[in-house]
Amino acid sequence: MKVRLFALLSTALLMALAAAPASASNLSQGLSYLALGDSVPFGFNPLVDASNPENFTGYPEIVAQRVHVKDVNATCPGEATGGFLSLTGTDNVCRPYRSAFPLHVSYSTSQVDFAVAYLRAHPRTRLVTLTLGANDFFRFQKDCAATPPGPTCALGLGGVLAVMQANLSTIFGAIRSTGYSGLIVAVTYYSLNYADPASVGGALALNAAMSAAATANGALIASGFDAWAPVAATAGGDSCAAHLLIALPDGTCDVHPTPLGRDLLASAVIDKVATTCPEDNAVICLRARD
């Protein structure tokens, strides 16, 4: 991303679940979590060496640690919805990134094909998250700035958002077509500056398309926008000044989350998962689906 837009169980049991280490096999019991999307869940940071994917920690890794499951992070920086569906689909920079640097997970197919294959081969998957769509907008901006204009520019912003929503609906449908009946959580985008109408409007437009596709396919929504808003408010709405965005050497901020921003997104996912069972505990909710 490179432009601005935008207690039914006893107390003893609950304490034991909360205190157990993330690797505890008696909790994870082989359960897994598949993370899909772009550079936000990938954990991209422009200041570190991209040749080692372990340098990047996204919100999926934090979620997995906290709910005691294995995460498989198939995300790709620069992934757009068209490229997610096809290796020849409209891409932003995922394909160049994949050709130059390793991802968290190695695969040669499109991300959707990897997801479908993974879910069919791993029936004990209990959570899928998706953050995707911002790169559709970024590609649109680049196409409209080019001379001559690139192919997505002719669609107009409304057309780009409509294609994005349709592609996301296809993606959610593909996930369900595998027979996967577990939780799907769409994690929406934050605003770079909650005091800037353009930034807020851009984020909300992307989030509306993502949320509509998710809801139509039985997925839940974890609001990254709402997760950051209270913290950004402590700095006048500026996510950079609130230390939610990675600070760059020139004094500005990148558009990707700091550990603080990342952890707020992880908490939003965990809180949403916790709403799916009476115990209001994400660990128990995921295990209850086994």
Image: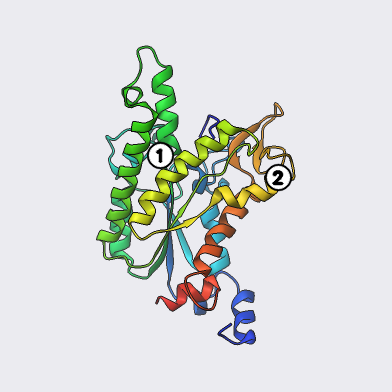
Residue sticking out furthest to the top: 147
Image location (x, y in percent) of residue 104 = 46, 49
Q: CA distance from mark 2 to mark 1?
A: 30 Å
Hey, what amino acid is under mark 2? Ala
Asked where in the image residue 153 lies, by quadrant, the reply is top left
Residue 93 to residue 232: above or below: above
Q: Which residue is mark 2?
A: 233
* Residue 198, disc: none
- In percent of the image, x 49 and y 68: which residue is there? 69
Which residue is painted at 35% across and 39% down in the image? 164
Q: Which residue is mark 1?
A: 79
Mark 2 or mark 1: which comes first in sequence?
1
**Residue 131 visible in image:** yes
- Residue type highlighted by circle 1: Glu
- Name the residue rendered at 51%, 69% in the picture: 275
Name the residue rendered at 29%, 60% in the picture: 176
Between 94 and 265, the residue placed more toward the observer is 265
Is 110 situated left or right of 139 in this image? left
Looking at the picture, tell me which residue is in the foreground, 54 or 16: 16
On the question of residue 101 being in view, the answer is no
Whole-percent x, y for residue 211 in the image: 42, 50
